[in-house]
Image: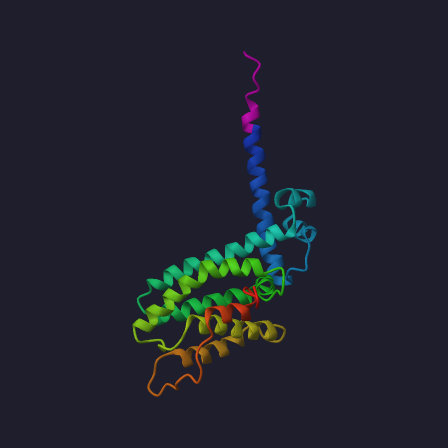
C-alpha cells in the first residue's frame, strides 16, 4: 500500500461527466426557452427549465450571451451542413428550394434566432460571422441551379439574401396570428425564381455586396 487514493481519478471523471451532463441539459433548455420566449429570459429562467442549479449554469456559461452565441453557432453549422447536402441533390432546383425553405423553417421555429438576426446591436457580430460561413455555400447552391437552367440567371447573391430577409420579416410579423402563412409567400417567391417562358426582365441592377451588407447592418455606412 502506498497511500495513493485510487478513487481520485474516478471521482474526477465522474465530476467531469456530471458537468457535461449539466451543460447539455442547460443547452437543451436554452434551445427550448429561447425558441418559445425569445432572448428576454435570463439564465435563472433557463436553469430552472433545465432542472440545474442557477450557480451551476453561471459556472458553465458565465452569462446569457455566451449561451446565445453557442446556440446561434449551432444553427449556422446546421445550415452549412444542409447547404453541402443541397449541392449534391439530384435535382439542382430542389436543392436550392430546399435550402431556402430549411433556412426559413429555422427562423419560423425559433423566436430567439429571429431576435438575433433582426437585432440592431447585439446580434450583428454573430450575424456577420454567420454570413461569412453560410453565404459562399448558399451562393454555390444558387449557381448550380442557374447552370442547370432551372433558376433565373439574373438572380444575384444579394437578391437571395434580401429575399431571405423579406420572408423572415413576414414570419416575424405574422407569427402572432399564423405560424405557417409565410409558406404562401415563399411559394410565390419560388415560382417567380424558377425559369419559365416569358420571364420579366429585371428593371434595375441588383445591389452590390457592400450595399446589401449596409442594408443588413453588418457593414454600416462610412465604416
61 in relation to 215, above or below: above
Closest to the observer, 171 or 198: 198
Residue 12 x %, y %: 57, 30
Q: Predominant secondary structure in magenta?
A: loop
In this picture, residue 140 sits left or right of residue 4: left
Q: Residue furthest bottom?
A: 198
Q: Residue at x 54, y 32 (%)?
A: 13
176 in relation to 43, above or below: below
Q: Residue furthest front?
A: 222
Q: Residue at x 35, y 80 (%)?
A: 195
Q: Residue furthest top?
A: 1
Is residue 110 within the magenta segment? no
Q: Residue at x 56, y 58 (%)?
A: 125
Q: Which residues are magenta?
A: 1-10
In this picture, residue 85 sits left or right of residue 161: left
Closest to the observer, 57 or 198: 198
In this picture, residue 17 sits left or right of residue 42: left
For the rendered model, the colour scheme is rainbow
Residue 97 x %, y %: 40, 71
Residue 221 x %, y %: 57, 68
Closest to the observer, 45 or 63: 63
Amino acid at each position: 500500500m502506498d497511500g495513493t487514493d485510487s478513487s481520485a481519478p474516478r471521482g474526477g471523471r465522474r465530476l467531469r461527466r456530471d458537468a457535461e451532463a449539466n451543460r447539455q441539459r442547460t443547452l437543451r433548455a436554452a434551445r427550448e426557452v429561447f425558441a418559445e420566449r425569445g432572448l428576454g429570459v435570463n439564465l435563472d429562467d433557463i436553469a430552472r427549465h433545465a432542472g440545474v442549479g442557477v450557480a451551476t449554469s453561471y459556472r458553465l456559461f458565465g452569462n446569457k450571451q455566451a449561451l446565445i452565441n453557442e446556440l446561434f453557432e449551432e444553427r449556422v453549422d446546421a445550415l452549412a451542413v444542409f447547404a453541402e447536402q443541397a449541392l449534391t441533390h439530384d435535382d439542382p432546383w430542389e436543392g436550392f428550394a430546399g435550402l431556402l425553405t430549411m433556412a426559413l423553417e429555422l427562423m419560423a421555429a425559433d423566436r430567439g434566432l429571429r431576435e438575433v438576426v433582426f437585432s440592431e446591436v447585439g446580434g450583428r457580430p454573430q450575424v456577420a460571422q454567420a454570413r461569412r460561413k453560410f453565404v459562399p455555400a448558399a451562393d454555390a447552391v444558387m449557381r448550380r441551379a442557374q447552370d442547370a437552367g432551372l433558376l433565373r440567371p439574373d438572380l444575384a447573391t444579394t437578391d437571395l439574401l434580401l429575399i431571405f430577409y423579406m420572408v423572415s420579416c413576414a414570419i416575424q410579423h405574422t407569427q402572432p396570428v399564423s405560424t405557417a402563412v409565410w409558406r404562401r409567400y415563399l411559394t410565390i417567391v419560388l415560382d417567380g425564381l424558377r425559369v419559365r417562358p416569358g420571364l420579366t426582365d429585371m428593371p434595375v441592377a441588383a445591389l452590390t455586396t457592400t450595399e446589401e451588407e449596409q442594408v443588413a447592418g453588418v457593414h454600416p455606412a462610412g465604416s
